[in-house]
Amino acid sequence: MIDKGDKLPVTRQCDLLDLSRSGVYYRPTPLSAKDMELMRQIDEIHLAYPFYGSRKIRNELWARGYDVGRDRVRRLMRRMGIEALYVKPRLSLAHPEHVTYPYLLRGLEITRANHVWSADITYIPMAKGFCYLVAIMDWASRMVLSWRLSNTLDSSFCVDALEEAIDKYGCPAIFNTDQGSQFTSESFTDALLLRGITISMDGKGRWMDNVFIERLWKSVKYEDIYLKAYGSMAEVKKGLASYFLFYNEKRWHQNFDRKTPSMVYFNTLPQRQAAA
């Protein structure tokens, strides 16, 4: 839009387009090595103590020998997209112009595949840099239906994961998320509504609904990410493809007696039950 090589001065181009010159001249600076290390430590602390806020995480960092202030910890937590899990009025900050939906799972018995799906996003540290992971999970079976990586927290990679899950496994009756801006965006909600999928969103007092997928993140990171120290998104993508195959089809889930998530999913599909 702005052509710095044009004869017309940049200041005049900004005036004509009603743009701020500061945004045109701004060049983002990469995160420092110290910030990257702090983010890795914050991620580990958050996994171990998901109820810790910025103050307690700062205290834990102090105990680990990191001289860091609370403001810096809060800034890095916002960049990572994480916050403490505890009962509070607002679990995540939705976009002020996005529509939110009521919570529909209270008292609902969820025992069959494709009854309820959910999605969440987590921070993935790499040897140099970081990225974000979104996963679509079937609640009844805990099976990971699809996932995507991104280096930004926009909604497009969440929509891509949703489209893949639907293409592979059909549509759920209900899709539940938090009120984060990625999931309240029109591109995400329209993809659900156009298929007749009912939308449910966590509200006040529903912090426990994140526990299922928080357990998934803990497994992913302790059993794969932290052990491998991937150097790039390409390596993360290849590694997670193998891990999620293992998680779905080989790894016994503690809530299911000698069954994997894949076994539970396909054994509880309504079509399978009807055929039987």
Image (tube, rainbow, N blue to C red):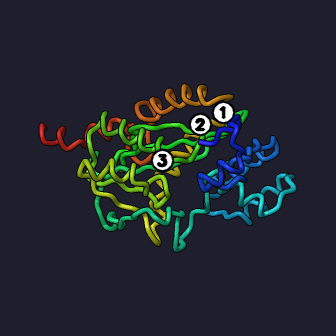
Asked which quadrant contains residue 86, the reply is bottom right
Instruction: Look at mark 2 in the image and give the residue it sits on.
Output: 223
Task: Tell me the number on the disc at residue 115.
Answer: none
Q: CA distance from mark 3 to mark 1?
A: 29 Å
* Nearer to the camera, 219 or 100: 100
Res 259 visible:
no
Residue 273 % position (x, y)? 17, 42
* Nearer to the camera, 124 or 64: 124
The three-letter code of the residue at mark 3 reads Ser
**Helix, strand or loop under label 2:** helix
Do tag 3 and tag 2 residues touch (Cβ < 8 Å)?
Answer: no
**Helix, strand or loop under label 3:** loop
Do tag 1 and tag 2 residues touch (Cβ < 8 Å)?
Answer: yes
**Helix, strand or loop under label 1:** helix
When the figure is inspected, residue 124 is found, relative to residue 116, above or below; the finding is: above
Q: CA distance from mark 1 to mark 2?
A: 7 Å
Task: Tell me the number on the disc at residue 155.
Answer: 3
Residue 158 % position (x, y)? 45, 44
* Nearer to the camera, 15 or 69: 15
Q: Earlier in the sequence, mark 3 or mark 2?
A: 3
Is residue 225 rendered to the left or right of residue 179?
Answer: right
